Image (cartoon, helix red, strand yellow):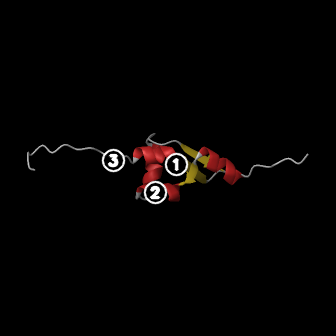
Amino acid sequence: MATRHTSAAEVRSERGLISLKKAAALVDVDRKTIRHWIDAGLLQGYKLNGNMWRVNLHEVLALARPVITSDTDGAA
């Protein structure tokens, strides 16, 4: 019986982990902003192989949700 080896890319994909570069591009911010969000505890970061950072796609998108504002000056 043959065994199937799961690649690291498949594991990251299943968990929804993406690079900081991809995360930054998704929400139109700089990669440094993603690192600041990790440092501030707004986003969980995962460090791979000692220097590669990954974040969860769904967490990034949750931080970049639309804000509903109300018009307070009465203008139509």
Q: Is residue 57 visible?
A: yes
In x, y percent, where is residue 76? Answer: 10, 50
Q: Amino acid at mark 2?
A: Leu
Of all residues shown, which one is farthest toward the left?
A: 74
Residue nearest the observer in this picture, 59 or 44: 59
Q: Residues within 10 Å of mark 3 (few under 14, many from 20)?
A: few
Q: Which residue is mark 3?
A: 66
Residue nearest the observer in this picture, 76 or 17: 76
Q: Are marks 3 and 2 in contact (CB under 8 Å)?
A: no
Q: Are marks 1 and 2 in contact (CB under 8 Å)?
A: yes
In x, y percent, where is residue 1? Answer: 91, 45
Residue name at image x 85 percent, y 47 percent: 3
* Mark 2 element type: helix
Q: Which residue is mark 1?
A: 57
Residues at marks 1 and 2, CA–CA distance in whole angstroms: 9 Å
Residues at marks 1 and 3, CA–CA distance in whole angstroms: 17 Å
Q: Amino acid at mark 3?
A: Pro
> In the rendering, which numbered label is found on residue 26?
2
Q: Amino acid at mark 1?
A: Leu
The tag earlier along the polypeptide, 3 or 2, is 2
Residue name at image x 46 percent, y 60 percent: 25
